[in-house]
Structures are given as structure tokens and as C-alpha cells.
Amino acid sequence: MFDTTQATWAAFWIIGAFVLFFALIPLLQTLPPRGRYMLIAVFTFISGLFFAAEFFLPVNEEGKNILTDPFQRLQGSLQVITALSLGLGTYGLIRLHLRNAVQRRPQWGYSLVLLIAFVTMAFFSVWNTLAEKELLGVQRTPLLERAFTLLFDYTLIQLDATMFSLIAFYIFSAAYRAFRIRSIEASILMFTAMVVMIGIVPLGKFISDSMGLPTTLTDEMRTNPFMLENILYNLRLPQIANWILNALNAPVQRAIEFGIGIGALAMAIRLWLSLERGIN
């Protein structure tokens, strides 16, 4: 059953949070720039310290510490921040294209099409969500089902596929420029890429079969790695491509991800300590 008391308290806290938020805006405007910076820096440091302390504090037998329960409750604030960011981005998008359409700036027709498509998609999406969850007495109708299928299954998905197909041409163009043989390293890169591309498609299997290389790996071949049939089997293009992807490419990807992780950690520390120039 739906608890009206909890709903009342939830609405009370939400309204109170909005009132407090809008009340703080004039207060922040009255502060000097240095004071606003210090206030934001203090709140940022305290919030980051809370999340860091919850991660590093020792836990009990249940895998919790004194900050685990408050941490789980505060994780809901991330959804609120995401929703506010989405709303702010939507407002900025509509404001920009609405201004282009009203003032009839160059290519204002594209802005008008975007606004019409945005409103139409949002309307049927909200309608479909309310019907699925049976909220506000909204029920599914043939019009809703046809419109939702037309907009999402027959339009949005096809546009996504078209966009990815166009991106493929840009990837091919970038690969062509990168694979120009101007040095020994570029030659190795070009040869390796050709082996991988041929090996992962049926053409690689066809070439290997045409050369008479073994198609299966028997138990005797597994026990004797230096057996001629085993060596010939590993010379098949699919096997070579798989070895390049797993033995050469995977460590490189892990190294890149490790470097990205260090960079993200450094950026997080700079934001936590308010050392980033963007907030000064």
C-alpha cells in the first residue's frame, strides 16, 4: 500500500530543499567573489572527505562502517544532481534553438525541426512511461502503441544506425591517414592491422583452409606444442589475429586504462582541493 505519510514527508523535504536552495542564491550574490569561492571550496572538501572516509574506514563483519548507511542514503543525491543537470541541459538546448527559430537566424529551420521532434518525442515518452507504471490513470491505447513504435523503433533506432554508419567512414579516413607507410613503425602497424582485419572475418578462415593448414586442434597436438601440426594450426590467420588481440592488444589497453585512471584520480584530487582553475 502507498504510505501517504511518507509521501507527505518526502514532499515536505523536497519543497524545503528547493526553498533553501533559492534562498541561498541571493545570499551567495551578496558575498564577495573570494567569499563565494571559500564557501564552495569548504563544501566541496567536506563532501569529498565524507565519500573518501567511507571507502577507507575499516568495516565490521557485515561489511559496513559508521558511514555506510549515510553513504547509501546520500547516493540518492547523485540521481538528483543528474536530473538537475539533465534539466539544465534541456533548458539550454531549448532556449538556444528557440531563439534561433524566433529570430530566424541562419539555418533556423533545423532548430525548428529539432524543437518539434524534441517535444513530440518527450510527450509520447512520458505518456508511455505513465501507461506502463499505471500512474495518474493513464492507460495504453492503440494510438500510443503505434506512435511509440513509429518514433522509437522505426525512427530513433534507424537514425542511430545511420549515424554509426557515417562515423565508420570517418574512422576509415582516419585509419588511412594513420596507416600511411612512412617509417618502420608505420609498416608494422599497417601489417598488423591487415592481419587482424583479415583474420577476424571469414576471409581469413578461407585463406587458411586454402593453404591446407589444420582446421582443428587434437589432444595430441595440445600435449606437444612443438608438433608440426600444432605449429601449422597456430599459423592460421584467425589464430594469429586472436593472439594479437589477446596477447598484444589487451596489455596495451590495460596500460591505457591505467593511465586514464591515474589522470582521473589527479583531476578528482584537484577538484576536491579546489585547485582547478575553472572554479577559481
Image (spheres, rainbow, N blue to C red):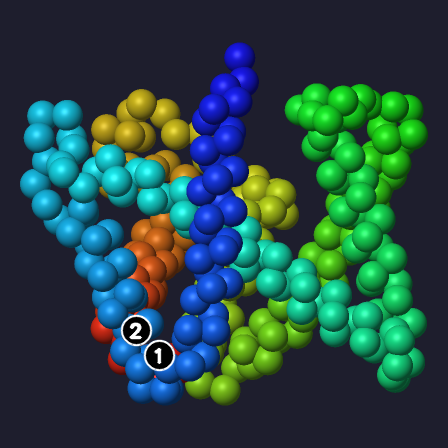
Q: Are marks 2 and 1 in contact (CB under 8 Å)?
A: yes
What residue is pinned by disc 2?
A: 39
Quadrant where the C terminus lies?
bottom left
Residue 260, picture quadrant: bottom left
Front one among 74 and 267: 74
Few, some or many residues within 10 Å of mark 1 (<14, 14–19, 20+): some
**Residue labelled with disc 1:** 36
In the displayed orientation, state which residue is furthest to the top.
1
Q: Quadrant of residue 218?
A: top left
Q: Is residue 121 among the parts visible in the rendering?
A: yes
Q: Which amino acid does the dot numbered 1 rest on?
A: Arg
Above or below, comparing residue 200 to residue 128 in the picture: below
Which percent across, then down, holds residue 232? 40, 43
Identify the residue at image location x=79%, y=71%: 97
The secondary element bearing badge 1 is classed as helix
| Distance from the alpha carbon under mark 2 to that under mark 1 | 5 Å
